[in-house]
Image: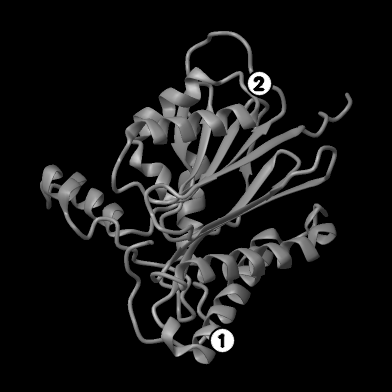
Amino acid sequence: MQPPSEPRLDAAMAVDVGRRAHQEDAVICDCPLGAELGLVVLADGMGGYRCGDVAGRIVLTEVFSELKLRSAELASSAADVPAALRRAAEGANACLHAYVDESPGAAGMGATLVAGVLRGRTLHWISVGDSPLYLFRDGALLRLNEDHSFGSVMRAMVEEGRMDAEAAARHPERTSLISVLSGGPVAHVDCPRVPFRLEDGDVLVFASDGLLHLDEAEIRRVLRAHAAAPAAGIADALMRAVAALDDPEQDNVSLAVVRIGPARTGGGPARRVAPESRAGSRAESRAEAPVGAVPALTGQAGPTG
């Protein structure tokens, strides 16, 4: 029996400044047709005018350049992709530290990170912060990565009966980050050792938290309505849904959409993604040492910009 062919990657990016004065998001998607490897890197800067945008660009540039430099190595089946992702994040964190050392006025700057390496039918990722990575498969939407915000802590408290759901939804600190790249030790890093197995028809959405002005039910509705569209059509539909909110507080929005192989046809019921695919990764991710080789800086993680 012949081995299955490698999937074709169809990818697209979209960005919008929203209602903010300037763009602090940065995203790059490198998924060439026929290439053995696909790379996606997205950073959402924080720290205010002329700091958040710099932080986002530093993290994007450092992580992408490190992964691109090692692309031939990463394409090898023997490559330790999680270790490469961690090195790239550590390098970006060190650059932020150096920048703040040289520019004290930039103290407090930082950025979230979500980056993915697609190799064959597998996905490795690293994320720090609240920028989501979604999988859409057969009509079902699943967030693959962890949410490093107080909102996730509050949701857990609600599930445990220790907090009222309405109070959690309205809490002013719900969007504040509990982990971020800022040049100091990083509290939480999501970087599973075991890759996630992809299937033809899967759609991945890497996004900044500006997309989360849409609730997940609406994101799922948009993806279902455009399930057969190319990646560019899906990205456009998501951005139009955000624009339709006409939210005066709309944050910057950036996203990268990657479709794996051809779209599925047929109208069968949505299948659940096997929970062990995610749960095992969570436990392993938490057990690993966090990124933190850089001396600590003054200041705490705060709201994204």
Question: Which colour assignment does the render follow?
Answer: one colour
Lower position in the chain sequence, tag 1 or tag 2: 1
Any part of residue 153 in sight: yes
Q: Residues within 10 Å of mark 2 (few under 14, many from 20)?
A: some
Furthest residue to the front?
A: 21
Q: Residue at x 80, y 58 (%)?
A: 71
The percent position of residue 263, horizontal first and vertical second, equals 65, 21
SS class, disc 1: helix
Q: Nearer the viewer, residue 37 or 183?
A: 183
Q: Is residue 115 visible?
A: no
> In the picture shown, does residue 93 fall above or below 131?
below
| Residue drawn at point x = 52 percent, y = 74 percent | 291
Residue ID for mark 2: 263
State the CA–CA distance, disc 1 to disc 2: 45 Å
Residues at discs 1 and 2 in contact (Cβ within 8 Å)? no
Left or right relative to 255: residue 39: right
Residue at the far right: name it: 2
Residue 13 in percent (x, y) is at 61, 42
Relative to 152, 58 lies left or right: right
Against 184, is 81 above or below? above
**Amino acid, disc 2:** Ala
How crowded pointer 1 is (Cα within 10 Å; few <14, some 14-19, many 20+) is rated as few
Query: Tag 1: residue type?
Result: Ala
Which corner quadrant holds the N terminus? top right
Residue at position x 49%, y 18% in the image:
225
Instruction: Answer above or below: position of 61 versus 154.
Output: below
Q: Nearer the viewer, residue 242 or 113?
A: 242
Measuring from the top left, give residue 31's x and y in whole percent: 74, 44
Q: Which residue is mark 1?
A: 98
74 horizontally vs 300: left or right: right
Quarter in which the C terminus is drawn? bottom left
The residue tagged with tag 2: helix, strand or loop?
A: loop
